[in-house]
Image (tube, rainbow, N blue to C red):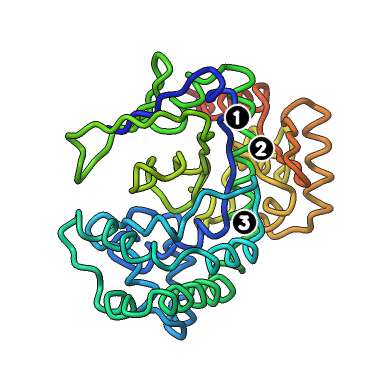
Amino acid sequence: MIRFRLGLADLAATSFAYSPLQETVLSLRMWGPHASRMPHMRGAFTGMRPVFEQLDHELLTALVARRRYWVPDLLTPRPAVPAPDIRAEFAALRATDPALLGPDLEQTFVPLGEPVPPRLATGLRDPAGLLAEITDALEAYWDACLLPLWPRLRSLLEADLAYRARVLAEHGAGLLFAGISERLTWQDGVLSIHRQGPGAGTTADIPIEGRRLLLTPSCFVDGVSTMLGHGAPPHIVYTARGTALLAEQPDPAAPHALENLLGRPRAWLLVLLAEPATTTELSHRLNVTPAAVSQHLSVLAAARLVDRTRHGRHVYYRRSTLGAALCLAEDDTPPAGS
């Protein structure tokens, strides 16, 4: 168990962010034996394999531990701002002290009973050269594989941040943390992560002491995790809400009575909006123009069937309580003649 001890000032300073670099590194899990743990992304990554294999895939896959899919802390630093630019993150990674790389790799692999992979062990003869090589490979991987997916990933991550802010404002820290993961508990000023795997039977107490706890959603974790080094700035990574929406899905099915009431396009939208989404994402899902989606959303909003939430430059729509009740009522409607 890992226990973060937060005073009132620490709790008030706790914040959320997302990181394109974090998503780039964590997505490397999709190329190994752990891809089955993230079925929502398997279709997209299977289609990208020919592109991935043209990159330095040997180096990239070596960065993920095979037993527990750990990755080096050094490559997933805490983002300095809520929504960092990926190029700035790569620049910061290049400027990292290369002397930190060797201990960080050992911390990633050795506790799992794995040796540091040969490609990385050999590169450590020149830590600065290896760090540059890793950063170059990650940047090429971002450009070729992650960048095409980024609009949808970013939309989902930003929707998660908007939702967490709403839960915190309406229900407080207890429900906020409880809603992130069943492995995360909050009691008497202590936020606990119930660990699995190596070290699960030990307890580490980490006082925040003004260092600001940061939580970041990810599309490439299944649960909740933190940095491997307990001396690192406090940082918790958790599964973003709605990752199932990233899977390729057929057109949504809406109950016939709901279609008769609203019309098929608006009924489809209401079904999709069980999770927050932007106009652009909805237009992609339904293969229609954003203008058409916007028109239907305006009607649904005027009828108070959907709510709007702004996060930065983006507006997210989600079924309102009334809209959710309408969908539930239609789902429960018995067939004619029953």
State whether residue 271 appears in this view. no
Q: Of the residues shown, which amino acid type is indicated by label 3?
A: Arg
At numbered mark 1, what does the secondary structure look like: helix, strand or loop?
Answer: helix
Q: Of the residues shown, which amino acid type is indicated by label 2?
A: Leu
State whether residue 220 appears in this view. yes
Foreground mark, 1 or 3? 3
Residue at the top extreme of this rendering: 188
Pointer 2 residue: 270
Q: Considering the image in quadrants, where does the N terminus appear?
A: top left
Q: Position of residue 48 (x, y in %)?
A: 48, 75
Cα–Cα span, label 3 and label 2: 19 Å
| Residue located 37% across and 59% down the image | 72
Give whichever of discs 1 and 3 has the lower sequence position: 3
In front of the other: 19 or 103:
103
In front of the other: 184 or 314:
184
At numbered mark 3, what does the secondary structure look like: helix, strand or loop?
Answer: helix
Pointer 1 residue: 327
Q: Position of residue 147 (x, y in %)?
A: 61, 68
Mark 2 and mark 1 residues within 8 Å of each other at the beta carbon: yes
Q: What label sits on residue 152 in the rendered view?
A: 3
Give whichever of discs 2 and 1 has the lower sequence position: 2
Task: Judge the density around disc 1: few (<14), some (14-19), many (≥20) Cα neighbours within 10 Å.
Answer: many
Cα–Cα span, label 1 and label 3: 25 Å
Question: Is 325 situated above or below 216?
Answer: above
Q: Position of residue 135 (x, y in %)?
A: 50, 72
